[in-house]
Image (cartoon, helix red, strand yellow):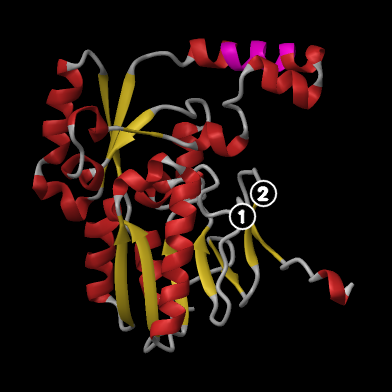
Amino acid sequence: MVQPGMLLKLIACEVFAREVNYCASLSANTIDVVFTDKAAHDRSDGLRAIVQQLIDDAEAARPYDAIVLGFGLCGNATASLSSSRVPLVVPRAHDCCTLFLGSRHRYREHFEDHPSRPFSSPGYYERGEGDSYLRESTLGQTLGIDKSYQEYVELYGEENARYIMETLSATSHAGQDDTVVFVDSPEFAHLGYAERFRKQAEADGKTFLHIAGDIRLFRKMTDGDWTPDEFLVLKPTERVAPCYDWDQIIRAEQPAEPPESR
């Protein structure tokens, strides 16, 4: 159910600037928006610290009805985030491409068999320099399938590690096609980034694949339409915890009790 008339803080990656600003302008809510730098995605721990500080700053600044995050799980960057006094709203998304596509189901459709396939969007493309016009999906990292053989041995034993590596290797070789994806929503197609991306990708010897984007999750995010199947609404002090699945993706985790209360 849409909740108009709220005062919201929206913290998002700058690659969503067009989508967030467009949808915020259509919303009946009052929304204060702040964007994090695209480069912050390069280190999950660093991004987590930045976002947590922005959450803390927001709580101290104004009496917001909720703080909304415009991020996916993004290689566990949003894991353990929490607010102390107001609800924290987080989309159920493995990474930012889920938000560009409009649902985790479409994300699974396009990336389940290619968890590291590079993609781009108007936001990534206009903020990219050199090779950074592409973004690799963090699905492999999120699902824990980006480890070395030795790491799998330490976790699961030698026989299981060998099986995992053989399975992942077969999947990887089956999907090796040098394809790069551009996700472009109709609202921003007039910018012409898809064609410019195609030319650059083909000049780099890559196969261009265009996929239609959908801003529906951004509309739901800004309108306060936080349905539980697509958004996790955490109570104050609850923390984001990853599920490593295709359905929930994230769940609420209760804060640890202080030793003296046990």
User: Cβ–Cβ below 8 Å for labels 2 and 1?
Assistant: yes
Residue wearing tag 1: 250
Task: Look at the magenta stretch and give its main secondary structure.
Answer: helix
Query: Relative to the observer, which residue lies in front, 141 or 22?
Result: 141
Please check the rendered image and state whether residue 164 is part of the magenta-colored stretch, yes or no: yes
Residue 225, percent from left and from top: 45, 73
Left or right of 105 on screen, residue 26: left
Please check the rendered image and state whether residue 120 is part of the magenta-colored stretch, yes or no: no
Residue 254, percent from left and from top: 73, 67
Q: Please state the extent of the stretch shown in magenta in the rendering.
A: 162-169
Q: CA distance from mark 2 to mark 1?
A: 5 Å
Query: Relative to the observer, which residue lies in front, 9 or 180?
Result: 9
The three-letter amino acid code for the residue at tag 2 is Cys
Q: Quick one: label 2 or label 1, which is nearer the N terminus?
A: 2
Asked which secondary structure carries label 1, the reply is strand
Residue 41, percent from left and from top: 39, 44
> Residue at (28%, 63%) from the top-left corner?
20
Residue wearing tag 2: 243
Badge 1 crowding class, 10 Å Cα cut-off, few under 14, some 14 to 19, many 20 or more, is many
The three-letter amino acid code for the residue at tag 1 is Ile
> Residue at (47%, 33%) from the top-left corner?
111
Residue 225 seen in render: no
Left or right of 214 on screen, residue 123: left
